[in-house]
Amino acid sequence: MKVLLVGSGGREHAIAWKLAKSERVSKIFVAPGNGGTAIENKCENVNITDIDELVVFARENNIELTFVGPEDPLTKGITDKFKAAGLRCFGPDSKGAQLEGSKAFSKDFMKKYGVKTAQYGTFTECDEAKGYLENCEYPIVIKADGLAAGKGVVIAETKEEAMKTIDDFMISDIFKGAGQKVVIEEFLEGVEASILSITDGKTLIPFISGKDHKQIFDGDKGPNTGGMGVLAPNPFVTEDVMKDFEENIVANTLKGIQEEGFDFKGIIFFGLMITKKGTYLLEYNVRMGDPETQSVLTLMESDLVDLVEAALEGRLHEVEVKWYDGACVNVVLASKGYPGTFEKGFEITIDESIKDKVFLAGAQLVDGVLRTSGGRVLSVVGRGRSIQEAREEAYKLTEMVNFEGKYFRRDI
Ligand code: AMP
Ligand code: GLY
């Protein structure tokens, strides 16, 4: 089977690596891909990002399955266009993708179907948002409605900070439209967990949970990043949490998907906050997490192509996903200076023996040499029978990859 994978991050390298393991896959085109997918088994990068051009490519190259990595093309309707062209595409339709594409839409959906989530209000007028902020409790959470490359959420500790955030989002328009509508919500205190899942719209199978580490420095200090490392399974996701999650979040989400009539055959990533008052849904993502995917797919023993096909054919109720009985620790190696400014173009060297445990993200193959091209350059993934074993393995791996300015957290 020839597969087309859309995207260019560390997540996509991990997906490509996992798809390549399937005996049923002969070739994977990655659009546009990165330095990792350029050298991965069975993979070839193709420099296309336009959705209509991807449809043409898939048709001309007899692609049997398209897997969409990031949210952006999903919200722009890539699945709808592939479907209209008679092509199989894994990912929700554009309506379903609004669960990630619009915070106001997703919060309204959660409320309508009784999914447990923080109290909130939606505002399109600056004065009304500010009026609300005059009398609310602090800290308060302010979210830009649209996609803002992971930067659209501010936890304001004070009224001044909250007012400034509203000015930035609604007046200065720093997200070019995405912050013209805002969600203001109750601050929840607790521990976060990422649960990715696969769904065919009727059945939803949760994957192994993960614990991301968002801040740049050890001890969760410093500015937020896209994620500096993931521990899986997440030690805070107990059986009780899973029960709460299944009963108060998953069941209602599926009911909503069906009643709203979304064509949702894809991934749902639940961003959870585990609090003293139970487990709350912070957000839906309609794609896999980055860097959660690198850990979760390393633990998955089932064939990913079989799973995706079962979802596309509405057969997930027949499927059982098999997992490695142990843990994974994924440590992100970043460019010095990230998430602020950093230099690019440094050569990356990877010990040949560990290629299978390294997922490249901000890296390009330039004239046969791997070079840094982004903030989060790559992930190394350690796997072991216990978290301790996995962690030791991951930190050993960090020493076997080198580039100038290599930075990573020591406490994943
Ligand atoms: P989101 O994109 O909605 O997941 O928000 C990004 C990050 O902001 C989350 O991973 C949390 O760390 C934080 N966050 C979002 N909503 C809340 C909330 N209601 N209470 C506390 N923290 C939150
Ligand atoms: N690691 C968080 C995300 O992918 O959104």
Image (cartoon, rainbow, N blue to C red):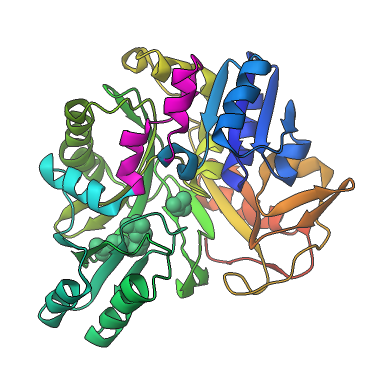
**Residue 137, visible in the rendered structure:** no
**Quadrant (top left/top right/bottom left/bottom right) for the N terminus:** top right
Classify residue 135 by image quadrant. bottom left
Residue 347 among those drawn in magenta: no
Residue at 52% over, 24% down: 304
Relative to 162, is 227 on the left or the right?
Answer: right
x then y, percent, for residue 372:
75, 59
Relative to 356, is 238 on the left or the right?
Answer: left
Residue at 53% over, 52% down: 388
Q: Nearest the camera: 256 or 131?
A: 131
x then y, percent, for residue 128:
14, 72
**Residue 4, visible in the rendered structure:** yes
Number of marks in picture: 0
Q: Nearest the camera: 297 or 60?
A: 60
Q: Nearest the camera: 105 or 202?
A: 105
Relative to 323, is 401 on the left or the right?
Answer: right
x then y, percent, for residue 279:
21, 51
x then y, percent, for residue 37:
71, 38
Q: Is residue 110 above or below residue 305?
A: below
Q: Is residue 314 above or below residue 332?
A: above
Residue at 50% over, 59% down: 227
Task: Give, as a single range, the part of the protein colored magenta.
Answer: 76-101
Residue at 65% over, 36% down: 31
Q: Nearest the camera: 103 or 395?
A: 103
The residue sitting at the bottom extreme is 160
Q: Is residue 273 above or below residue 166?
A: above
Relative to 277, is 28 on the left or the right?
Answer: right
